[in-house]
Amino acid sequence: MSLQRRSLLTTTVAAPLLSSWPAGAQQAQAQAPGFYRFRVGRFLVTTITDGQAMRANPTRGMVVNAEPAAVEQVLKDALIPVTGFNNPFVVTIVETGQDTFMFDTGTGGQLNDTAGLLQQNMRAAGFDPGRIDKVAITHFHADHITGLTTREDQPVFAKAEVLVPEAEWAWWTDEGNATRTPEMQRGTFGVVRRRFAPYKSRLHQIKDGAELAPGIRAVAAYGHTPGHTAFHISDGDQQLFIMGDCANRPEVFLRYPDWHFVFDVDGPMASATRKRLFGRAADERARVIGYHFPFPANGYIARWSEGFRFVPADWSSAI
């Protein structure tokens, strides 16, 4: 074969292959799409990363009832940088066979430059935001509800019903509670008004213990916010807790559940919730998902000294 013909064949074959690679892959500037699937009985569960935010100087201010030196040592023991580390945002989608549920909505790309990947990762996983049936919210902090709307206040989830904890709604829609809310969180009242407004006709309040669908129940997890709620998924002997912000970074707040995170509205109540729910997950060997756990953010809980440790689930190519 002539050199000219060999060169022509090489170019003809290689060009389509190269053109099929996304630009980020060619330039090694981006990760692969961030989603991971597993089953809980008949339920298909997908965790999807929205990105992360940098928590600067975590030894001071992150834990309000522990000495900075103690926090620094825990971070060092977990090999987490003490000068600042990434705080992940992980949204969960559960397919029941009848409906597609989304739990929390991420940042909508409106809070910081390193988050806002949810929609592109949803599409990579085969989900159209406009076809989500139900959006269930754990609580109303901005990193969980800003993704409900665009910057122009248009709804992202065109047909979804929005399910919110009754106690959470009662607190954040009553301006009289502002003086009883930590000053740094008083902006949440305005965020709630803005993000839920386009869903007014499709918004439903849910009580503790409410069944969202067969096998999916709301579980009171108060403390981080006044109505913070976890969700329990079960089918047969398999179960999963979607924990929301029951604990922030597991290396810190599971190891020492009595430590109070700076964004816990009621620190002692949040600690009691951590011990109750993570204790139950440990005793029942239930799988858990944490919104701020390292992606893909799912695994199991083991008791450890006076606290717990997070045991990531094995990655599997099988679903």
Image (cartoon, rainbow, N blue to C red):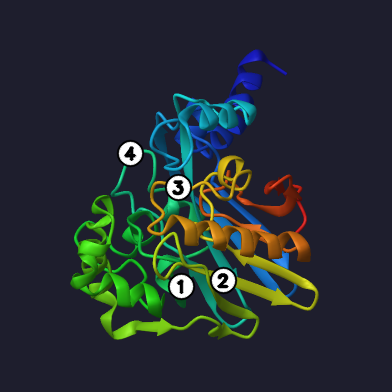
Q: Which mark is residue 261?
A: 3
Relative to 144, is 21 above or below?
Answer: above
Q: Quadrant of the C terminus?
A: bottom right
Label 4 vs 2, first from the N-terminus: 4
Q: Residue at coordinates 46% horizontally, 30% vertically from top-left?
A: 68
Q: Position of residue 198 (x, y in %)?
A: 24, 74
Quote the CA–CA distance across marks 3 and 4: 24 Å
| Residue to which mark 2 is pinned | 231
Task: Measure the alpha-carbon separation of dots 4 and 2.
Answer: 29 Å
Amino acid type shown at disc 4: Asp
Give the mark toward the camera: 3 or 4. Answer: 3
The residue beneath circle 1 is 136
**Are the residues flagged by discs 2 and 3 in contact, CB closer than 8 Å?**
no
Q: Secondary structure at mark 1?
A: strand
Residue 23, percent from left and from top: 45, 34
Q: Nearer the viewer, residue 277 or 216?
A: 277
Between disc 2 and disc 3, whose residue precedes?
Answer: 2
Q: Residues within 10 Å of mark 2 (few under 14, many from 20)?
A: many
Residue 105, by quadrant, is bottom left
**Decide: marks 1, 2 in contact (CB < 8 A)?**
yes
Q: Dot 4 surroundings within 10 Å: few (below 14), some, or many (20 or more)?
A: few
Measured Cα–Cα span from mark 3 to mark 1:
23 Å
Label 1 amino acid? Answer: Ala
Q: Residues within 10 Å of mark 3 (few under 14, many from 20)?
A: many
